[in-house]
Amino acid sequence: MARRADFGMMVWDGASPGTAVNVLRLAIANKPCVIYDLARGSMATTYNVGDWCAMLRHAGPDIRRQAEARMMPDERLALPG
């Protein structure tokens, strides 16, 4: 999906690692993604991997670990230290 899309629009429950990985794939490709976070009742737009990391800070470390488990090796390499 992320390869073919020009941008993304996600409804996220604040816990789904699959949605988080799809947002990351768009961020790696420098494609914007509007996210409506149901858990927080807020909207945000990611433009890059830094924005993705900020989005996941609200979700907690368990969600990030679950998302990382679903990533391809090259996607893990795109993450900061």
Image: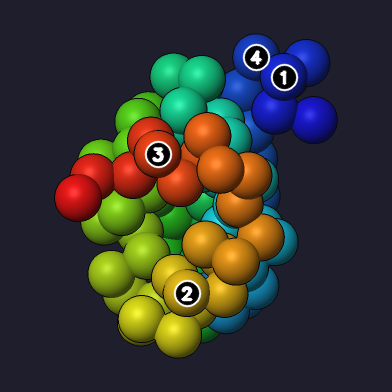
Q: CA distance from mark 1 to mark 2?
A: 23 Å
Few, some or many residues within 10 Å of mark 3 (<14, 14–19, 20+): few
The reply to whether dot 1 and dot 4 touch (C-beta < 8 Å) is no
Q: Of the residues under marks 4 and 2, which one precedes in the sequence?
A: 4
Q: Residue at x 45, y 85 (%)?
A: 62
The reply to whether dot 3 and dot 1 touch (C-beta < 8 Å) is no
The reply to whether dot 4 and dot 2 touch (C-beta < 8 Å) is no
Q: Of the residues under marks 3 and 1, which one precedes in the sequence?
A: 1
Few, some or many residues within 10 Å of mark 1 (<14, 14–19, 20+): few
Residue corresponding to mark 1: 3
Q: Is residue 49 among the parts visible in the rendering?
A: yes
Few, some or many residues within 10 Å of mark 2 (<14, 14–19, 20+): few
Q: Residue at x 61, y 52 (%)?
A: 71
Few, some or many residues within 10 Å of mark 4 (<14, 14–19, 20+): few
Q: Of the residues under marks 3 and 2, which one precedes in the sequence?
A: 2
Label of residue 65 in the image: 2
Which image quadrant is residue 11 in? bottom right
Q: Of the residues under marks 4 and 3, which one precedes in the sequence?
A: 4
Position of residue 19 relative to residue 75, above or below, is below
The x, y position of residue 55, in whole percent, is 35, 59
Residue corresponding to mark 4: 6
Residue corresponding to mark 3: 77
